[in-house]
Amino acid sequence: ASPLPKFPMDWSADGKFLLYDVLDTKQGFDVWALPLEGDRKPFPVVNTEFNEGLSQFSPDGHWIAYQSDRTGRTEIYLRPFPGAGGDVRVSVDGGAQVRWNPDGRELFYVATDNRLMAVPIRFASGSTSPEVGTPIALFKTILSSAAGPMYKQQYMVSPDGQSFVMHSAVGEASASPITVILNWKPRTSK
């Protein structure tokens, strides 16, 4: 408990940690983790004078991807979790809203020109740093400001990593709510 606003971002696949952003009025956004076992004492993951956030666990839980404005614009970085280790920059010319491909071998992010980018990531055996490939533009997005502040994820990656669900609109006037139908039963063919 603290008076600072907190925003949950991601759960580790093993259910042992919650990543969340904390807004400090003096320092900006930082990334923290809450262990969900043991003493449950939160600890800082990325805590600097810059804005860091929208963090995501790698599928194996050993890395996090997040965005930071330490260069003067928002960029995407990787960092080992938990523990020490240097950051590895992933984006080239700015990027935000990072997501992992569920296979753990690729990152997606939105470039400053609103293109969705894909970056191959390779974790060589015995290496302490990932090999980051060249970002490739997949397609232009039309992310909607109707989804709220840009400090929220506006897309999801499918379980096979081959398609995306995005909150987008052609224009502000055409933005409409999303309807999700749960527990539907498909018609059986005869």
Image (spheres, rainbow, N blue to C red):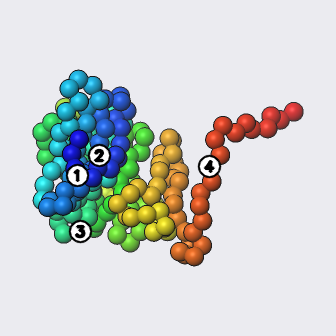
Tag 3 near tag 1, CB within 8 Å: no
State which mark lies toward you, 2 or 3. 2
State which mark lies toward you, 3 or 1. 1
**Position in image of residue 142 (x %, y %):** 49, 68
State which mark lies toward you, 4 or 3. 4
The mark that comes first in sequence, 4 or 3, is 3
- Find numbered disc 3 in the image and state the secondary structure of the residue it sits on: loop
Tag 1 near tag 4, CB within 8 Å: no
The mark that comes first in sequence, 3 or 1, is 1
* Residue 81 against residue 165 in the figure, above or below: above
Label 4, label 3: how far apart the Cα atoms are: 35 Å
Quarter placement of the N terminus? top left
- Find numbered disc 1 in the image and state the secondary structure of the residue it sits on: loop
Residue 105 in the figure: left or right of residue 32: right
- The residue to which callout 2 is attached is 20
**Position in image of residue 149 (x %, y %):** 39, 64
- Find numbered disc 4 in the image and state the secondary structure of the residue it sits on: loop
- The residue to which callout 1 is attached is 4
Instruction: Give me the residue at 38% from left, 57% from top.
Output: 152
Q: Which amino acid, by three-letter code, is at mark 4?
A: Val
Instruction: Give me the residue at 47% from left, 48% from top.
Output: 157
Q: Dot 1, how many residues are within 10 Å of its Cα: few (below 14), some (14-19), or many (20+)? A: few
Of the pair 46 and 41, the residue shown nearer to us? 41
* Residue 31 against residue 82 in the figure, above or below: below
Q: Which amino acid, by three-letter code, is at mark 3?
A: Arg
Label 2, label 4: how far apart the Cα atoms are: 26 Å
* Residue 73, numbered label: 3
Instruction: Give me the residue at 15% from left, 59% from top.
Output: 27
- The residue to which callout 4 is attached is 180
